[in-house]
Amino acid sequence: MKELIEGTAEQCERISAYFNEKRAQLPQKFKNIPNLYTLDDYLIKNKSFQAWIDWARAKFAQMHPELTGIPGDRYFVGVDSREGDMGGFHGKIAGGFFFIENRAMAIMLNSRFIDNPLLRQLELQKSYIHDSIHYSTFRRISAVPPAMDVPFPVYRQQYGINFKNPDGTAYSTVSATRRAPLSINLNLLMDGVTDLIASAMVKELSNSNSFVLQPGLAQEVFHDITGATVNFDHYERARDFHQTVLTPTRRFLEFWDKDNTLVPLLLDGMLTGDLQRLQSFFNERTHVDNSWELIFKM
Ligand SMILES: [Zn+2]
């Protein structure tokens, strides 16, 4: 996890103190979740899952020096979904990575909806991989220039390959995705790439286990987490995520990347915050020098 804090010595000290305080606490949202365990505690009770987590961590180390699994005391697992809610990555309780507190949470799929324990475990594995990529994504935190009168004098100037202005406005606007596949919002692209990488890893893992699943919801959960492009007739929330995040990401990648070199470059840019190799990629494709700005800065 690469994090830079920028400002005067005094500002940096104040920002660090703020983050240290926040990161010693649980996010407010975690406090309302019943039966929430740290991953470390969850693994004591579910020993078979340890091998999967170890596998993911070893794979991360091979993929990129800056890619690491979230430590087991900063990852939280909710094992009881609320009655009536399916739980999981697309469940009503939005888990995921909480940047300020530097912790993440996943709610397991509700056993009333998905009774296959191995499938529930695999879905949790996908969330762990997805959130670990967010956790490993580069951050640059800056003090707001003193002339600006803002309630909170700190902003996240850079997260991965995306930027923010001191007034909170984004470098890459949501509407960029309307120009897909030529352009795409950079936050959406990072989430899409994160999810495609997580799906590919889960697919690889699933090959070493046999899954016998009934057609319907269970099969659609399996397809969702292994990145299959199918109709999600029984799994509306997965369908929405595929339509709004994964489909534009895939279209963008297909448009720009004929040789499958762009995803590793995007991952490298996200983890290091260094955009040079990515910018060269787009300059070569377009024969225009500042193509990155022209494509993404809208
Ligand atoms: Zn995400």
Image (cartoon, rainbow, N blue to C red):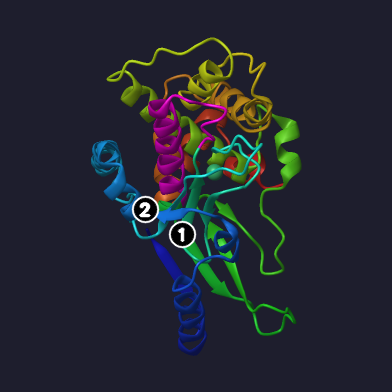
Question: Disc count in the image?
Answer: 2
**Residue 166 percent location from the top left of the image:** 66, 69
Q: Residue at x 72, y 68 (%)?
A: 167
Which residue is identified by label 1?
A: 103
Task: Please name the amino acid that badge 1 sits on.
Answer: Arg
Name the secondary structure under disc 2: loop
**Residue 267 percent location from the top left of the image:** 42, 41
159 lies above or below 278: below
- What residue occupies the far bottom of the structure in this picture? 10
**Residue 228 percent location from the top left of the image:** 51, 18
Q: Residue at x 72, y 60 (%)?
A: 169
Q: Residue at x 53, y 23 (%)?
A: 221
Q: Give the mark nearest the N terminus, 1 or 2.
A: 2
Real-space Cα separation, disc 1 to disc 2, in angstroms: 8 Å
Q: From which residue to which does the magenta span run?
A: 109-134
Task: Please name the amino acid that badge 2 sits on.
Answer: Ile
Q: Looking at the magenta stretch, what is its main secondary structure? A: helix
226 lies above or below 25: above
Which residue is identified by label 2?
A: 70
Asked whether, in this view, residue 179 is left or right of residue 124, the answer is: right
On the image, which quarter does residue 234 sit in?
A: top right
73 or 135, which is in the foreground?
Answer: 73
180 lies above or below 47: above
Asked whether, in this view, residue 127 is left or right of residue 164, the answer is: left
